[in-house]
Image (tube, grey):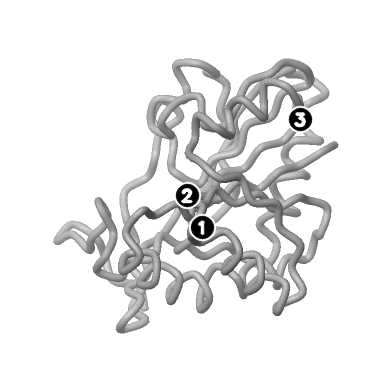
């Protein structure tokens, strides 16, 4: 099964790109390198001015990437023309466990015997990038899926960027969650939405 991991790193603001790249090289890139399953393709959405820089940086780490200049709509056009069985979205500043891709593919293989199309989500914890403290957060229900989202389709031209992650179950209502907390939502101060809340429970 063809599996694309899609990551958005498209920032028009150079300063913001540099801030996110600092987190990306310390969290995301090591996570990609640590994957026990290498059976996936890494696609990254970028702005034109950062394309060569990112390609060179990933080459230094021995990681093959395909860059797409543009946004989610640009990727949607690609997905329409190139049907992909498994598509995983993963933000450029977040962490994944070494067995994350392996567990996604295992879940897809298991449920593809019964369902033609479904979603697989990872339940995250929050990680404070600066202190290293980790926090338990609320559970994402099957009706409002997390940003750590995978789309499986036996056939068809759906894109993982067709809808925001919380609303994706309106397109694909069948949802499965991975066991445990295989992903971390990294909070570093530049996040547009994420922050540590009073309701989050510190676990380390």
Q: Is residue 190 above or below residue 10?
A: below
Q: Residue at x 52, y 59 (%)?
A: 183
Question: Residue 43 location in percent, x, y?
Answer: 66, 49
What residue is pinned by disc 3? 85
Where the C terminus falls, by quadrant? bottom left
Across the whole image, how many numbered discs are drawn on residues?
A: 3
Question: Residue 153 location in percent, x, y?
Answer: 72, 23
Question: Residue 178 location in percent, x, y?
Answer: 60, 46
Q: Earlier in the sequence, mark 2 or mark 1?
A: 2
Q: Earlier in the sequence, mark 1 or mark 3?
A: 3
What residue is pinned by disc 1? 181
122 or 150: nearer the viewer: 150
Q: Quadrant of residue 198?
A: bottom left
190 or 50: nearer the viewer: 50
Question: Residue 9 location in percent, x, y?
Answer: 48, 55
* Proximity of marks 1 and 3: CB atoms separated by less than 8 Å: no
Q: Quadrant of residue 141?
A: top left
CA gap between label 2 and label 1 equals 5 Å
Q: Secondary structure at mark 3?
A: loop
What is the crowding at mark 1: few (fewer than 14 residues within 10 Å), some, or many (at least 20)? Answer: some
CA gap between label 3 and label 2 equals 22 Å
Q: Is 11 situated left or right of 89 in this image?
A: left
In the rendered image, the residue lying farthest to the bottom is 131
Q: Is 70 situated left or right of 35 in this image?
A: left
Q: Which mark is residue 123?
A: 2
Q: Earlier in the sequence, mark 3 or mark 2?
A: 3
Q: Is 183 situated left or right of 52 in this image?
A: left
Q: Secondary structure at mark 2?
A: loop
15 or 113: nearer the viewer: 15
CA gap between label 1 and label 3 equals 24 Å
Where the N terminus falls, by quadrant? top right
């Amino acid at each position: 099964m063809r599996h694309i991991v899609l990551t958005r790193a498209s920032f028009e603001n150079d300063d913001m790109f540099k801030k996110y790249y600092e987190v990306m090289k310390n969290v995301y890139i090591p996570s990609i390198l640590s994957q026990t399953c290498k059976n996936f393709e890494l696609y990254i959405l970028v702005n034109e001015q950062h394309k060569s820089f990112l390609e060179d940086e990933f080459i230094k780490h021995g990681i093959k990437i395909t860059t797409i200049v543009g946004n989610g709509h640009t990727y949607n056009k690609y997905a329409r023309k190139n049907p992909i069985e498994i598509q995983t979205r993963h933000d450029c500043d977040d962490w994944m466990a070494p067995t994350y891709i392996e567990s996604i593919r295992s879940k897809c293989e298991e449920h593809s015997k019964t369902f033609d199309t479904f979603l697989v989500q990872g339940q995250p914890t929050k990680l404070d990038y600066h202190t290293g403290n980790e926090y338990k957060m609320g559970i994402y229900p099957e009706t409002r899926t997390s940003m750590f989202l995978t789309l499986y389709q036996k056939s068809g031209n759906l894109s993982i960027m067709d809808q925001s992650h919380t609303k994706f179950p309106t397109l694909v209502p069948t949802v499965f969650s991975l066991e445990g907390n295989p992903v971390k939502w990294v909070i570093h101060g530049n996040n547009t939405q994420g922050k540590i809340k009073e309701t989050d429970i510190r676990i380390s």
